[in-house]
């Protein structure tokens, strides 16, 4: 089959093998399509979403709409204990490669600058951040007092050959044109400069199934890497792999995300990089992942079908990835959804199919015959204890 919207971001190939075509719910204002079409390139085996959004639309989304500027969870670039652990892991990998404490290090997609602040604590003095989001840049400049600029992976605000180290932590899985992004990295790096990359490890999604289709319901992740394809991508852009390997990121106690990190070094062009050839590993791993998730979803689909048939008023709490997967894939939208609930004030400004999202205070008014559906893999226990504390009399259905 031919890809409809997007050629392979690694080799440019247009023939693909289908892996999944799934519909997920979303906020009404979301830029993203409700459908996720996962494919693998026939030429090289790289996996990616055949999204119709172009780079401009994606950049506008991260500039204006992305919730991460307001989020506090692990991975939003903040300073939570989980983030600190993640930074420590990345710093442990990176620091042995760094020439000196005054090496010029730029974190591309720095969000709220958590990793930069961590590096400063380790004694690094020449730090800077780049982000698409002005609020993030202002925060890094004013609160952390670290230089920061608005910029994109395709237009970094630096002159040629001026940077020693570029950090792309959880960035490349979001980028439409990967080859152009790495060409830009190559442009601003000094000779022998380093590229530190961290991305989710798609070859291990099946080993870390946080929740049903968790890894595919993150529509912002439009590229799915394994170590082989990440290495080929870097080589094709003129980088030599120094170290590539697996890592884990703790999202909450007992919930870990599999990552790949890579340290690559700029080499003068033209590099005789081997052109990518086909490697089937990633395709095969993702194929079993998709099948396993479909099996895991079946019992939840049965529970929700019973609830929908009963007509009981339902309160769905936790309007995130888990909710949006259950909403369509498990038929949650067919239940008598009286309220959608989330603690995050940014989400309370959003709607889903026209329904407003409320704060958990609405449980105080819940009728006795109602059902609270808890749809958060990370916060399920805290939600259940909140409901006990307010003496919620209805039924509690923990689905995550
Ligand atoms: Zn390809």
Image (cartoon, grey):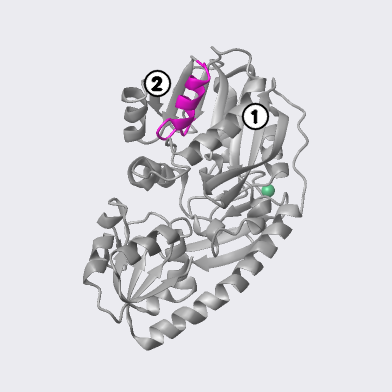
Q: Is residue 227 visible?
A: yes
Q: Which residue is mark 2?
A: 146
In-front residue for pair 41/353? 353
| Quarter location, residue 246 | top right
Question: Contact, CB < 8 Å: mark 2 with mark 1?
Answer: no
In-front residue for pair 279/332? 332
Question: In this picture, is 187 found above or below 38?
Answer: above
Left or right: 308, with 198 as reference point: left
Q: Residue at x 40, y 35 (%)?
A: 132
Q: Residues within 10 Å of mark 2 (few under 14, many from 20)?
A: many
Q: Earlier in the sequence, mark 2 or mark 1?
A: 1
Left or right: 374, with 5 as reference point: left
Q: Is residue 26 visible?
A: no
Q: Position of residue 367 (x, y in %)?
A: 25, 78
The answer to whether mark 1 is within 8 Å of ligand 1 is: no
Is 137 magenta? The answer is no
The disc placed on residue 93 is 1
Left or right: 143, with 127 as reference point: left
CA separation, marks 2 and 1?
A: 22 Å
Quadrant of the drawing holding the N terminus: bottom right
Q: Say what secondary structure mark 1 lies in.
A: helix
In-front residue for pair 153/324? 324
Is 120 magenta? The answer is yes
Question: In this picture, is 213 found above or below 161?
Answer: below
Q: Position of residue 133 (x, y in %)?
A: 36, 36
Residue extending farthest to the bottom is: 309
> Which stretch did the figure color magenta?
108-124
| Quarter location, residue 25 | bottom left
Q: Position of residue 147 (x, y in %)?
A: 39, 20
Question: In this picture, is 55 found above or below 373?
Answer: above
- Between circles 2 and 1, the one closer to the viewer is 1
Q: Residue at x 56, y 66 (%)?
A: 21
């Amino acid at each position: 089959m031919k890809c409809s919207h997007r050629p392979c971001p690694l080799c440019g190939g247009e023939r693909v093998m289908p892996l999944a075509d799934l519909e997920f719910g979303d906020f009404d204002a979301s830029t993203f399509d409700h459908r996720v079409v996962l494919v693998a390139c026939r030429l090289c085996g790289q996996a990616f979403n055949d999204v119709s959004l172009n780079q401009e639309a994606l950049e506008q989304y991260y500039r204006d709409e992305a919730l991460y500027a307001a989020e506090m969870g692990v991975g939003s670039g903040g300073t939570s204990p989980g983030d600190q652990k993640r930074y420590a892991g990345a710093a442990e990998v990176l620091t042995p490669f760094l020439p000196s404490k005054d090496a010029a290090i730029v974190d591309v997609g720095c969000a709220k600058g958590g990793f930069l602040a961590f590096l400063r604590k380790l004694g690094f003095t020449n730090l800077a951040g780049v982000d698409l989001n002005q609020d993030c840049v202002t925060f890094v400049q004013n609160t952390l007092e670290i230089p920061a600029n608005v910029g994109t992976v395709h237009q970094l605000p630096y002159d040629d050959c001026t940077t020693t180290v570029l950090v792309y932590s959880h960035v490349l899985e979001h980028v439409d044109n990967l080859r152009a992004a790495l060409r830009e990295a190559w442009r601003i790096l000094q000779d022998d400069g380093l590229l530190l990359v961290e991305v989710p490890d798609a070859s291990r999604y099946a080993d870390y199934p946080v929740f049903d289709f968790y890894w595919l319901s993150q529509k912002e992740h439009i590229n799915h890497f394994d170590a082989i394809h990440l290495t080929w991508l870097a080589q094709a852009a003129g980088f030599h792999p120094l170290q590539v390997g697996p890592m884990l990121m703790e999202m909450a106690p007992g919930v870990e995300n599999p990552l790949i990190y890579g340290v690559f070094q700029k080499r003068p062009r033209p590099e005789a990089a081997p052109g990518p050839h086909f490697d089937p590993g990633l395709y095969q791993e993702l194929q079993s992942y998709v099948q396993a998730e479909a099996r895991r979803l079946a019992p939840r689909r049965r529970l929700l079908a019973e609830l929908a048939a009963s007509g009981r008023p339902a309160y769905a709490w936790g309007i995130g990835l888990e909710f949006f997967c259950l909403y369509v894939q498990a038929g949650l939208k067919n239940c008598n959804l009286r309220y959608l609930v989330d603690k995050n004030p940014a989400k309370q400004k959003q709607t889903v199919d026209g329904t407003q999202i409320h704060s958990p205070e609405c449980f105080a008014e819940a009728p006795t015959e109602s059902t609270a559906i808890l749809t958060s893999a990370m916060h399920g226990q805290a939600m259940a204890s909140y409901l006990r504390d307010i003496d919620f009399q209805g039924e509690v259905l923990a689905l995550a």
